Amino acid sequence: MNIKTIRKENNLLNKELCKENQGIYMDFASYLRVSNLSEFEQEEVLSDILRMFFDWEKEGKKVKDMIGEDYKDFADEIIYAVKPHKTLLQKCKEYLLTMIEALCYMFTIDFLFLYMPKIVKGNFSLTYDFSLDIAVRVLLIFIVLESLFNYTGRNSFHLSDQNIPKSTRFFIGCGIGCFFITIIFSTILRKINILSIDIRYIIILIIIFWAYKGLKLIIAKSRKKL
Amino acid sequence: MADRSQFLRGTLEGCILKIIDRCETYGYEIAEKLQQYGFSEISEGTIYPLLLRLEKNGMIDSVKKESAYGPKRKYYKLTATGKKEIQEFYSIWCEIQSGINLIFEEEKNDEYKNDKKRK
């Protein structure tokens, strides 16, 4: 079974738990997502946690009576038991892949809204200008999102005790951060051009990216059917 | 004061291995069996990290089986390394047990002799 199938199954089964346990499960999920566990290990552990929650719920037992009040401590014990060993190289690879993916999304958006209307009008001799403003924007948005993701994950058990829903706080934080970053940097750095590429290369890149995405989706679906 | 959890630390893994050795079983059942043997404070939550560690160290293997409700249940069985580990654990335990018994019995005997002399 692949990671996506287990994740989907876990997310569906989580909804069958009582509200209180759903919240605790989500805290565990957030905490494990920012740990050094591999994606597969995360989903395996989450599936085991779900299994335990289902059994305890059926027996009328509370989670805190079974693992103690300190959920973070329990999660740390699990992580320690699995002994994850993600090397610096693996971490860099993950960050790099996320950055490339973010760039491809940005190219697609820019192409659709800025260049596509011009091409439709018959202007084919276009160059894609990659200004310093775009590079800084991508980098900073990535840093802000990554930091917020890590912060909410590492403090998931503590943040749940407060009143505002975690997801709301997360999106508010992301929104404010990205808004200011975009405004400040776009006006100053827009004029500095790093690279100008023929739009056809960007179109090829976008096609390759989305073809790869589509292929991955088809393979995942065919595996699920098997 | 003697802390039961301190005593249990280190010995619980051996007990879990022995329970799994008897028949293929799952976490909830292992916790129940341990409770029946008098380890009343042990819950499935306590043993889950231990089961993960035992599996990671190749002493047990797991296989997922369909359950009547919820996600699939993980059943554990012992590996050859696990069987070897049980034997080692039990021989170490017997050595410790006999050592402790000797200390305490000798103490008892001394007290008995002293009482006799006084009388």
Image (cartoon, coloured by chain):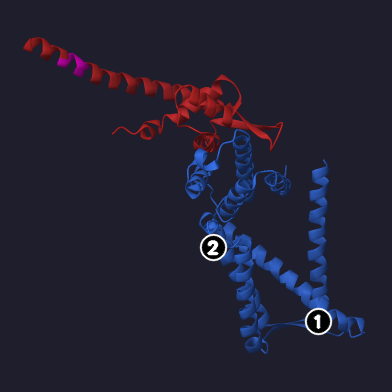
Chain colours: A blue, B red
Label number found at residue A151: 2
**Could you say which is closer to the camera, residue B74 or residue B58?**
B74
Say if labels 2 and 1 share a chain.
yes
Percent x, y for residue A129? 74, 83
Position of residue A43 relative to residue B51, above or below, is below
Q: Which residue is mark 1?
A: A114
Residue type at tag 1: Leu
One can see residue B40 in this view: yes
* Location of residue B92 (image quadrant): top left
Residue A46 as seen in the image, left or right of residue A198: left
**Could you say which is closer to the camera, residue A15 or residue B62?**
A15
Badge 1: few (under 14), some or many (20 or more) residues near its Cα, within 10 Å? few
Which span is picked out in magenta? Answer: B106-111
Q: What is the secondary structure assignment of the residue under circle 2?
A: helix
Position of residue B63 relative to residue A158, above or below, is above
Q: Considering the image in quadrants, where does the C terminus of chain B appear?
A: top left
* Location of residue B30 (image quadrant): top right
Please name the residue shown 80% across and 45% down the image. Answer: A223
Q: Main secondary structure of the magenta part?
A: helix
Residue type at tag 2: Tyr
